[in-house]
Image: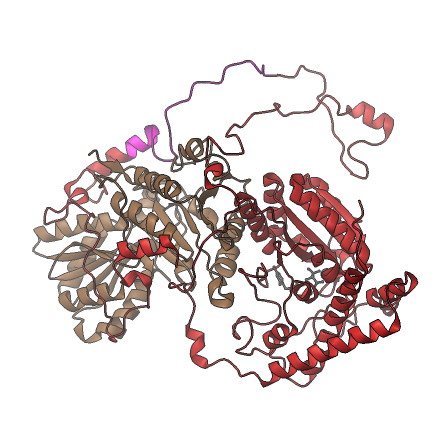
Chain colours: A red, B brown
Amino acid sequence: MSYPLTREQYLDLYYYMQLNRMLEERMVRLFRQNKIVGGLYSSLGQEGVSVGTAYALEKKDWLAPMIRNIGALLVKGVPPRDIFTQHMAKYTSPTLGKDGTSHFGDLKVRHIVSPISMLGDLIPVMTGVAMAGRYLGQKIVALTWIGDGGSSTGAFHEGLCLAASQRAPFVLILENNQWAYSTPVSRQAPVKNLADRAVAYGIKSAIVDGNDVVAVYQATKEAVEGSRAGDGPRLIEVKTMRMRGHAQHDPADYVPKEMFEHWKARDPIVRYEKYLTDNKLWDQRQKAEILARIERLLDEDQKFAEESPMPPPELAEEGVYCEGCHTIAADWKRSKQEVTPPNCSVEAVWKVENFGGLEPEIPTAKEVAASGSNGPPGSARSTVKNSGHGAIAPKASEPLAEKPEARIPFGRGPKDKEFRQAAENRSYGRNPREKSFQKGPQGKSFGTNSQGKTFNKNSHGKPFRKSSHDKPFVKNSQDKQGGR
Amino acid sequence: MAAITMLEAIRQALFEEMDRDPAVVAIGEDIGVYGGAFKATEGLLGKFGPERVIETPIAETGLVGAACGMSFLGLRPVAEMQFIDFIACCFNQVTNFVAKSHYLWGAPVPMVLRGPSGGGVHGGPFHSANPEMYFAHTPGLKIIYPSTAYDAKGLLKSAIRDNNPVLFFEHKFLYRRVKEEIPAGDYTVPIGKAITRREGRDLTILSYAAMAHTSLEAAETLAKEGIDAEVIDLRTLMPLDKDAILASVKRTNKLLVVHEDTRTGGIAGEIAAIVCEGAFEDLDGPITRVTALDTPVPYAPPLEERFLPNAEKIVAAARELAKY
Ligand SMILES: Cc1ncc(C[n+]2csc(CCOP(=O)(O)OP(=O)(O)O)c2C)c(N)n1
Ligand SMILES: [Mg+2]
């Protein structure tokens, strides 16, 4: 299926790719002037991926960028000044200087989850976002990216296993830029396409030319809408190339020169300019206008960032806990009655569909030998059917064994009984039947004195941690229910 | 009203909170049809259905990450670790994602991570852990470790209503071994408040979870010897009720800290520092520790008994301390 774009949208894609590139070019200059506090990562040559994927999302959808997805943030409406100030650790940055790079989010307006450095962790988190969105009836899709390198993490695997089992409306863009720091893909994974792994999770996948922004957009749009319609999670591998070192400090000497040249000839912006011209989607005047608009915006935002102050030192002590600063309220787009039986849209029945074992259609070893292959195309799997003695097939009609009395691990059974008896006889046993467990020394019922003794000041005379719990608790909990 | 176990109290808290607020959902392994390894979620699926009682594959990083993501949309997920030992598998999600979100980018994570913990039941080295201090060391998390049915219910409710990520440790030795009558209807117990279980003049014993009971037992023995011990149950390790600790030490002038966690890096060390900073002049004796050994939790009963603190060990340490 193809999703037609208007002329305006075609020019939008160009605008965001150029904004992405020109913003990063400026940051390289700022880095050389020592105005960037930490590291600087380049997405040069990958702008088509960030922009084409994010452009396929609706406003209500959620995304979580990786470090090379600044373009996606721009598409979501993040102003360049947020990127400048984040890198320069300014007080005016979205994290007030507490974190750098693209590590910031926006729960309320733009629906962006902040990444953390640990690769792969966003995959389960965005799966949860997708699940919650579905639960609340919001009809959203959650999307995030992962590098070729990050796709080897456990979190990638767990996240996709979970997303697949939940059929979550979740799209994962596997951004294969050929390198994970200094390690080429070929030394990370002996598979031709990383997307082939989708088969193992039982989810649909696609492979797309990452340096063709329109192709990226189309593939993502198809996945996003399929996933939104209940098709389960999707994996898209985009093939692209990291055109700089891992970060500014890395000259990338390990990359063959010819490889850079190969990909330079496929630069996504140059290619797209030609596409726009060939398809008569713009003229030179429009191009000049777009570039001038970007320069003006970047001038203004860079100035803003450079003139912004650093955060005040005492900020370091603030914000570890939410002490009433946030109102937490879910945005329900379906009736709350619908989530719980009997109105619940999913039936609480788990049927065992088959009894496992080998499916009859799987060929025997002999058949495999005769045909030379089996399993899904391209897989190296071979399956050996049982060697002749009869299989033990349980009958579907057999009644299940009666439900035994509830048992808990280590809680019951002869071993535990022994233990309890021994503990009772032992002078140091923790036997609850002894008096001290039930009653306090004053004969008060043990433990029900929820007020206890309260001490409001510590030795420094300051209230210990400005906690919401210093207030009378019952009142406080009601406050919370009302949503602060 | 009949007395109920701590396990039942926890189950009741989950029921009542899910009933009260459809934003509360349960997520974990085998928590639905089976009702959880310890049956803490038994009956939840039937009442609240599979959209709210979410069974997952065996993927701790996956399910804790997902709970975190759900909380970003305003849900209040309660995630279960089948055994708290497996929290090690999602350590990164908990300490780097969940704990830091509010500080770094202002995103509260109102989720609860609960599970059976603790030893004394011959669970062996991978089913007996007390990993609370890995997390007490992580700014951004709250840590609760109750010792009674009443507290378990009231504190779990507080945890679910809290806007911060709360780790809720359920001592499996206590699950079915402590029982008490608890009031009908809704009540909460405040997070961050210790409780005095026994008042005394001669020394303070600070403890929590199963060891709160053992400490009380030791206090009874000490009383027969003329040593009047105060026993305080911390209930919450983060935030720690420093005021209650200091006030008691200022009265008794001697402090014994008892925990089932291993010795090095256990909360006793932290409490010792707090008391030195806040009540040094009031101390009449060395701050003393009775803790588990610095070893993994061994399996065989004689080994585990050697490993764990018990009333005899507490009494012996208290006697020495009382001599000052
Ligand atoms: C779990 C984890 N291990 C190691 C690192 C250090 N690290 C940061 S980026 C990177 C390479 C990532 O490669 P890839 O996933 O392909 O992303 P790319 O840099 O190519 O965009 C490494 C090893 C990390 N951030 N997280
Ligand atoms: Mg890479």
Tell me if I can see residue B26 in this picture. yes
Residue located at (34% from left, 48% from top): B156
The dominant secondary structure in magenta is loop
Q: Is residue A38 left or right of residue A405?
A: right
Residue B80 screen position, x and y as percent: 44, 44
Tell me if I can see residue B324 in this picture. no
Q: Is residue B102 left or right of residue A116?
A: left
Out of B166 and A155, give the one closest to the viewer: B166
Out of A157 and A96, give the one closest to the viewer: A96
Name the quadrant of the C terminus of chain B.
bottom left
Residue located at (48% from left, 32% from top): A343
Residue located at (36% from left, 52% from top): A481
Residue A77 screen position, x and y as percent: 64, 65
- Residue A217 magenta-highlighted: no
Q: Is residue A415 above or below residue A102?
A: above
Residue located at (30% from left, 46% from top): B152
Name the quadrant of the N terminus of chain B.
top left
Residue B273 screen position, x and y as percent: 30, 70
Q: Residue furthest right?
A: A278
- Magenta part of the chain: A394-419
